Structures are given as structure tokens and as C-alpha cells.
Image (cartoon, grey):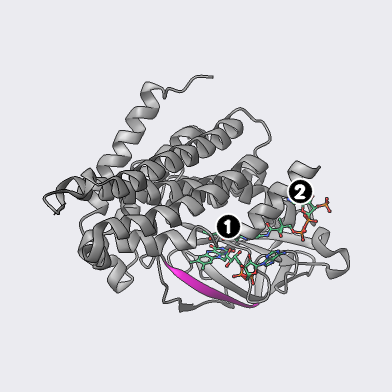
Amino acid sequence: MYFQFTEEQEMIRQAARDFAQTELKPGVIERDEHQTFPAEQVKMLGELGFLGMMVSPDYGGAGMDAISYVLVMEELSKIDASTSVVVSVNNSLVCYGLEKYGSEAQKQKYLVPLAKGEKIGAFCLSEPEAGSDATSQRTTAIDMGDHYLLNGVKNWITNGNSASTYLVIAQTDASKRHHGINALIVERGMEGFTVGHKENKLGIRGSDTHSLMFTDVKVPKENRIGEDGFGFKFAMNTLDGGRIGIASQALGIASGAYELAMAYAKERRAFGKTIADLQATQFKLADMATEIEAARLLCLKAAWLKDKGLPYAQASSMAKLYASEVAMRTTVEAVQIHGGYGFVKEYHVERLMRDAKITQIYEGTSEIQRIVISREVLR
Ligand code: CAA
Ligand code: FAD
């Protein structure tokens, strides 16, 4: 047991912290207000190597470990969860899936530009009728010999209108149920592929959430990831790592709110002293600090297991379940500590509170994480 980061991990964390302060903080309120996608910031993150963090340098990535990924996600999410979700999806759902399961040709063609941040990816599993119940895919990919004919609708797709490369999960042979599902690489611009309306959201409003429509899209056979019928396992396995990203996002939202609440409590005076002198505030801060530390350890444990090549599905679900609930509790209390000021945009905590909610919903709701965890512990 060794609770210390390496010098390199500390440097990466500091780089992310600096970036968040200098490039994300200015404009974060306006981007939230106007639902503006952080295109410039995402481009800079690509140049820093933060969009293909764990990808091997052989494929244009930064070759960092999952621990560093947790640190970067926490730092970015303290300031701007709308940007950090782009980092999470590109790294752990799209790049990871392609590097682990893609063919050499797929890696050269699609992974390299994604890992370098020259292009952005999207991961398309959810549908209007298939969210938690992910095996109930209605999108079809009919085998036509040299290509698949893709038809259907995907919902809630992060980076929906900003991506160039889409990993789309679809049913090829319904009689085989989830063993008849495939994962296909779909390019922006393929005939019959259209991007639907942008969702007007409670939180992470700067992120780009769209529905996608596929009408007789011809996807070449060579764009299938893995063997025929591997698509559902591909999605589940990829989500195991994705959940480390979202857990770390929740951790960052919580620690960002905690830092703001701490600073405010030390300054705000009431009844002749600062509110930090009141035990009621001190106990709130003590609970926040304890829960955030526990969430951080769960995120780091899941990342450590992944780095060691050990099973991490249960650990990543535990991290996501706990960190997302801590994010919600902490942000609500951070608003409370700010009193009326917490209710207005300039103080940032109301945005963090709105952003926290999605971490309990996407990449598997809290109820789904409990299903995954209980199946593992009862096994
Ligand atoms: N790794 C590999 N394979 C796995 C797996 C994992 N972690 N979990 C399940 N599987 C396999 C199972 O082994 C099984 O295959 P076999 O029959 O060959 O054994 C197959 O998948 C089906 O598994 P289940 O029988 O457990 O399926 P289920 O219908 O009971 O559902 C579930 C399982 C965990 C609930 C799953 O449907 C699920 O995770 N749902 C949530 C979906 C989700 O997280 N969506 C996120 C979309 S992406 C997103 O949200 C991105 C973003 O916001 C930014
Ligand atoms: P449902 O599955 O309909 O769930 C409704 C409620 O029922 C939830 O509380 C759920 O926990 C509960 N429930 C369902 N089944 C069970 C059960 N068996 N036991 C107990 N409770 C249950 N998806 C993608 O594929 N790619 C993306 O990039 C992406 N980005 C997203 C971004 C945003 C902003 C949002 C809002 C969603 C995004 N999603 C994405 C979709 C997201 O993963 C789903 O919304 C989520 O998995 C839940 O599915 P659902 O919305 O259909 O809810």
C-alpha cells in the first residue's frame, strides 16, 4: 500500500489544474448559460494530450496511466464538467474501445486522429426505448455481405454534433439476443446519417447532447469492431472503464464545490464571526471532506486495478455509485453554505449542483451500478 503519487502524476495533475484555472474558468458561466460547446478548449486539451491520455504513443496517445486520468478528470471537473465529459467519452469509451478491440487498420484510420485530439469521438448505445435495459437494441445493422445496413435512432449522444467518429451499437440478429449485437464505426458524413436536435439540459449544458438518426446507412464490414456478435460485450467492457471517468468527474464536481464552500465559509461573517466558526458549518465541511476522500480512494483503487490488468468492473461501479452520490450531497450543502449567494450564477456552486445530477444517471444510473455491484458480491 503506497498512498503517494509519482512525480509525473503530480506534474500531470498540476497541468490539468492550471489549464482549468486559465482556460476553463473564464467563460464557464457563459458557456453554461448559452449551451456553448467548448470547442476551443477541447482543441487545446487535444494538444496537451488529454484526449488520448491512456493510448499508446504508437497510436498518437500520451501513454499515461489510469491514475493520471483520474487526477486530470478531477481537476477539470472542479471547474467545468461540460468539458470534462468530452475528455471522459473520448478517452475511456472511444479511444479505449478502439485500442483494445479495434483491428490494426481501424486503429490507424480512426484511433490515431482521436488520440491526438484532431477528431472527437462519440459512443452510441442508448436509444429512446433502450437506456438501462441496454440489450433491448432497436437499431438494426443488417448483414448485406460486404456492408451492414444501419437503421434506427440513438438518443442522448454526448459529442453528438461535434464528433467525427461514432461507435454505434446495433442489433444484427435479433434471434441471438445480445449475442447478435455488433459495434460499428460510423463516420460523420456517411449517407443517411443525420444529427437530430440538441437537448436543452439541466446541467453540463456546454456539452453537446443530440439524438442521431440512421436511415439505410451503408457501413463497410471492415468497420465492425471484433467478431460478429461481440458488440454488447464490447459496450459493457468499455463502460467498465468509462465509469472510472464519470466517477472521477463526480469527484471533481464534489471537490470543486467543497473548495468554494470552504473559502466562502472563512470569509462570510454572521453574528460577529465567520460562518466557518459555527459548528454547524464545521460539521458540514467535515462530512464533505470525509466523503470526498472516500470517493477519491474508490476512484483511484478502480484506476489502479485497471493499470495492473486486474478485474475492475465492480470497483468502477462502486466508485461511480459512491462518487456521484457524494457529488450530489456535497453540492447541495455547498449551495447551503453560500446562502442566497449560492443560488446565483456568479458563485459557481449552483452550476456544480446542476452538473452533479447527471453523474447519477449516465453511464448507468445509480440503480444499475447497484445491480452490477450486487451481482458481483453475491456471485
Ligand atoms: N464486461 C463484459 N461483459 C459483460 C459485462 C462486463 N462488465 N457485464 C455484462 N456482460 C455480458 C454478460 O456476461 C452477458 O453475456 P453472456 O450471456 O455471454 O454471459 C451479457 O453481457 C448480458 O449481461 P446481463 O445478462 O448481465 O444483461 P442484463 O440485461 O441483465 O443487463 C446491465 C446488464 C448491467 C444492466 C447493462 O444492461 C447495463 O450496463 N445497463 C446500463 C447501460 C449504460 O450504462 N449505458 C450507458 C450509455 S453510455 C453513456 O451514458 C455515456 C455518457 O453518458 C457520457
Ligand atoms: P431508464 O432506463 O428508462 O430508467 C428510468 C429509471 O428507472 C431510472 O431511475 C433507472 O435507474 C430505473 N431503472 C431502470 N431499470 C431498472 C432496474 N432493472 N432496476 C432498478 N431501477 C431501474 N448514452 C449513450 O449511449 N451515449 C452517450 O454519450 C450518452 N450521453 C448522455 C448524456 C446525457 C446528458 C444524458 C442525460 C444521457 C446520456 N446517455 C448516453 C444516456 C444514458 O446513459 C441513459 O440516460 C441512462 O443509461 C439511463 O437510461 P434511460 O434514460 O433510458 O432511463
- Report the predominant secondary structure element of the magenta stretch: strand
Label 2 sits on residue: 375
Disc 2 Cβ-to-ligand 1 distance below 8 Å: yes
Would you say residue 269 is visible in this rendering? Answer: yes
Q: Is residue 168 magenta?
A: no
Between 361 and 322, the residue placed more toward the observer is 322
The percent coordinates of residue 301 (x first, y second) are 55, 33
Q: Is residue 211 magenta?
A: yes
Q: Quadrant of the N terminus?
A: top right
Between 156 and 375, the residue placed more toward the observer is 375
Q: Residue furthest right?
A: 175
Residue, x 54% and y 38% (percent of image)? 298
The percent coordinates of residue 118 (x first, y second) are 40, 52
Residue 301 falls left or right of residue 326: right
Q: Quadrant of the C terminus?
A: top right
Would you say residue 63 is visible in this rendering? Answer: no
Between 183 and 9, the residue placed more toward the observer is 9
Q: Quadrant of ligand 1?
A: bottom right
The amino acid pointed to by label 1 is: Glu
Identify whether 24 is placed above or below 127. Answer: above
Specify the segment rendered in magenta: 208-215
Q: Earlier in the sequence, mark 1 or mark 2?
A: 1
Q: Residue furthest left?
A: 272
The amino acid pointed to by label 2 is: Arg
Disc 1 Cβ-to-ligand 1 distance below 8 Å: yes
Residue, x 57% and y 37% (percent of image)? 302
Residue, x 36% and y 48% (percent of image)? 284
Label 1 sits on residue: 363
The percent coordinates of residue 349 (x first, y second) are 30, 59
